[in-house]
Amino acid sequence: QIQLVQSGPELKKPGESVKISCKASGYTFTDYAMHWVKQVPGKGLKWMGWINTYTGKPTYADDFKGRFVFSLEASASTANLQISNLKNEDTANVFCARGGGTTPFDYWGQGVMVTVSS
Amino acid sequence: DVVLTQTPVSLSVTLGDQASISCRSSQSLEYSDGYTYLEWYLQKPGQSPQLLIYEVSNRFSGVPDRFIGSGSGTDFTLKISRVEPEDLGVYYCFQATHDPWTFGGGTKLELK
């Protein structure tokens, strides 16, 4: 069955970096883009951007340009999100989701809680 | 950026009632290919969002037929007939027509 399994919760200090992963299984990884969605606790959903899993080309929403990097380990069917120079406002649950554009987000990871606190 | 405005923000219902959620867009969501990339997601407490409806009115696999999406252009509606306990949570509309893609603010469906 199709699954997106994300890495575990992270507790970081301001200024540190974090890398979270999203491992796909049950389908051909390069057939679908991978998207990232942020949710601050108690708030709504915000689309962060996506990565073309065939070419590796990332696209970032404006609020996520600069400190955010989408990458792939295609041989491991894994998409990664690295956030550098963490700020308190990066505290959020971050989801990966398959699809996008002409294909809706039909499968989601379980989410990774990233907490930034001194 | 396209702004999706959902109303109401919260909706209290009795089990078995019908519920209706509106999603209004600041721009037409019809893409140049003729399709309208407006989707609905439900996020149950403590869970990831799940896809209900895509391209305005197409139910995703396994979604009960009591969920009905409709609309065009800038005005869209999700109707849930005969609300059941497993329908409770926060509903989000989402558009993938205009970059950047955007979510509505959410509508919380709860019991009266």
Image (cartoon, coloured by chain):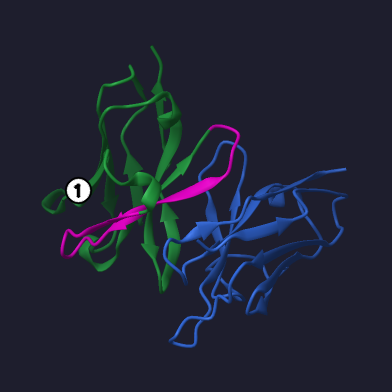
Chain colours: A green, B blue
Q: Which residue is mark 1?
A: A71
Does residue A1 appear to the left or right of B85 in the view shown? Answer: left
Task: Look at the picture and state if B1 lies above or below B33.
Answer: above
Residue B58 in picture, x, y percent from top left: 58, 76
Does residue A47 appear to the left or right of A50 in the view shown? Answer: right
Q: Residue at x 41, y 39 (%)?
A: A94
Q: Which residues are magenta?
A: A41-60
Quick one: SS at disc 1? strand
> Which residue is outermost to the left?
A75
Residue A8 seen from this side: yes
Residue A22 in picture, x, y percent from top left: 29, 44
Q: Residue at x 62, y 67 (%)?
A: B26
Q: Quadrant of residue A16?
A: top left
Task: Look at the picture and state if B53 lies above or below A8.
Answer: below
Residue B38 part of the magenta segment: no
Task: Look at the picture and state if A1 lies above or below A79.
Answer: below
> Which residue is outermost to the bottom?
B34
Q: Residue at x 65, y 74 (%)?
A: B74
Which quadrant of the rendered structure holds the N terminus of chain A? bottom left
Does residue B9 appear to the left or right of B42 in the view shown? Answer: right
Q: Chain of mark 1?
A: A
Which quadrant of the rendered structure holds the C terminus of chain A? top left
Q: Residue at x 28, y 51 (%)?
A: A24
Task: Look at the picture and state if B94 lies above or below A5.
Answer: below
State the residue in front, A58 or B79.
Answer: A58
> Which residue is outermost to the top?
A118
Residue A42 part of the magenta segment: yes
- Please name the amino acid that badge 1 sits on: Ser
State the residue in front, A11 or A116.
Answer: A116
State the residue in front, A85 or B107.
Answer: A85
Residue A84 in picture, x, y percent from top left: 25, 31
